[in-house]
Image (cartoon, rainbow, N blue to C red):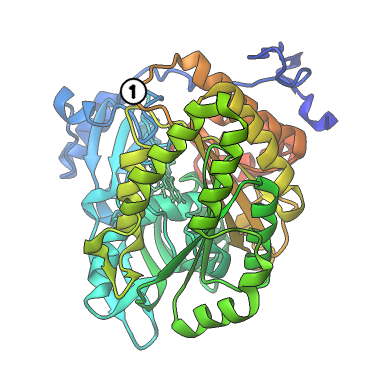
Amino acid sequence: MPQDNLHEIKGNKNRLAPVTPDSLTGVPRQQTNPSRWSGSGWDAFVAELNSAGVNISQSSAARSIYITDGGGVAMGLPRGVLVARSSENVSKTLKAAQKHRVPVTVRGGGLTTEGECVSYGGLQLDMRGMSRVLHIDSANMTVRAEAGIYWHSLAEALRRQGLDYLSAPLNMTSSVGGTLGVGGIDINSPKFGCSADQAISLKVVTPTGYIVECSEQVNPELFEQVLLGYGQFGVITEATLKIRPFTPIRMHYFYYSSLKESIEDLRFLVEEEIADYAGILTMLDRAINLLVAFDSDEREQEFFSRYRSRLRGHGEIGFTLRMAAHYALHPWKVKEALYLLERKRALLPELSPSAHMQDNKMVDRTVVFSRAVWKFWGGRQMVIPDLATSREKFARAVERGNAVCRRYFPNYTLYCVGIRLFGSRPRYELSCIPPDAQDFAYGCEFEPILGDHYYSRDHLQSFKNEIYDIGVDMGTSYYRFGGMMKGYIRRVFNNELVDKHLRIKQEADPAMILNPDVIF
Ligand SMILES: Cc1cc2nc3c(=O)[nH]c(=O)nc-3n(C[C@H](O)[C@H](O)[C@H](O)COP(=O)(O)OP(=O)(O)OC[C@H]3O[C@@H](n4cnc5c(N)ncnc54)[C@H](O)[C@@H]3O)c2cc1C
């Protein structure tokens, strides 16, 4: 275990709090719940904004819809809510918040799962009031939009001109601003990188209320801080993004019963740039599905003529026969076999719904996958710890995480993707991009299927801790990075690096009001 992780807080070595008998010992756990805010300064804050024409909603009806995020595990209530309408009113709000030391928690689609966008008192700034497409430049292939827009709404506007964004979460209600701050992974991330890497320029309101345009050329430091910055260094109010021509995609599925083989084949596809889209989606660790898709018929034909034979995955019929043989020899696992069969029967048609298929090609992958995710994995609570690793550590990390899933839940899914990196951009430091990854990073989400089962918070937290502990042990990063799991940030990165970013934060946000307790 790295000695860096054995640091001291306020001179006292943290007391150990292992959550399961075999979780890592000797690693101090740090604060996992935000401290309480006393509420002082609130009335003066509201009054000042009121007189400046910015009205805060304080009714319990307005506040209570923000009680949790997509995960449904972190709970908190804001003292008031502001739906952002312009960069100017965000600026007035942050200036007043600095003066009266009122915490401001920004929210886009609210799809975090560790409470990163949940307010524990203070103001909830809902960016979805800023959701217009401002300008589509089809000559230079860029779009300018307000940052509270959902990616799906952006796609609708682009589609009218035969255009599309590059890559975004496979979820219809994630916003552009929230995603640029956390990363954004699509099944085409091996080709285009994470969503944050498609930003060309941003309008940002700094924590002290200045409205600043930034890009790689103009105010590059701020640009790099805000991208993958988890809302710490400014509120993104507008973004200019790269776009591309829209293409329906032809999807192919190859089935594996070995995680290791499927991961090796995913890496082959990603690193040799063979497919336009690739990812792994499993049912337990028994039915492992490598999905591969193409933007053009030429790329698809090239794959089948040159590379298909190098993949070890089977087609559906071949795999079904192998599974039948396996369960015939292991009859005591009949329950598992029935579960897989039922899951396959229900899920596969949802991945090619007739309304979204044209000439056997999938139109609107985001709609198809988003619907399937909510239908088959969604529920009152969604617990999705993950590990983000270098290529060398990926297979081992997934195998270890899989063993944890097996112990905690009867049914679960693993979702694995590759992510192209572009050199060593400053934005990658202290982010979901693992520090030792070069050219490509990989991520795996460990997703129990909770269904109608009730699990205690302790059970869910122990599960997450065991996954996150693997990250500490192996020196990886996490895609979910902060909120309830922020204690892991110091453990997985060294103190020196976290303190370096903390100093930048303190300088940019003297009263530490913007998205407090998420990272620092
Ligand atoms: C069912 C489900 C499926 C998912 N699938 C995917 C997937 O396929 N790929 C993927 O990458 N992720 C996925 N996620 C994770 C989630 O979609 C991402 O975290 C999402 O991109 C965040 O966008 P959001 O608008 O929901 O951000 P929010 O949750 O609203 O905010 C995220 C963080 O950014 C801050 N923030 C929000 N808006 C701004 C802004 N304008 N300026 C500055 N800071 C801001 C918030 O304070 C918070 O800290 C999934 C989550 C769920 C629940």
Q: Where does the image place residue 477, in percent across and percent down from the top left?
A: 65, 43
| Ligand 1 is within 8 Å of the C-beta of the residue at disc 1 | no
Compared with 323, 43 (above or below) is above
Which of the image's four quarters has the C terminus?
A: top right
- Asked if 340 appears above or below 260 in the picture, the reply is above
Can residue 120 be seen in the rendering of this structure?
Answer: yes
Tell me if residue 175 can be seen: no
Tell me the residue at 41%/71% (across/down).
Answer: 250
Residue 377: image x %, image y %?
38, 37
Give the number of callouts. Answer: 1
Q: Position of residue 79 (x, y in %)?
A: 27, 25
Q: Is residue 299 above or below residue 259?
A: below
Give the quadrant of residue 115: top left
Please report the residue visible at 74 percent of the width from the left and 42 percent of the height from the top.
Answer: 396
**On the picture, is 68 further left or further right than 229?**
left
Towards the viewer: 472 or 216: 472
Is the N terminus in the top left, top right, bottom left or bottom right quadrant? Answer: top right
Residue drawn at 60 percent across, 57 percent down: 427
Q: Which image quadrant is residue 63 in?
A: top left
Name the secondary structure under disc 1: loop
Q: Circle 1 is placed at which residue position?
A: 452
Crowding near the residue tagged with mark 1, few <14, some 14–19, many ≥20 C-alpha atoms within 10 Å: few
Of residues 263 and 354, which is closer to you in this image?
354
Residue 233 to residue 40: above or below:
below
Q: Residue at x 33, y 43 (%)?
A: 346
- Is 161 situated left or right of 449 in this image? left
Residue 100: where, in percent of width, then height? 36, 31
Q: What is the three-letter code of the residue carrying label 1?
A: Asp
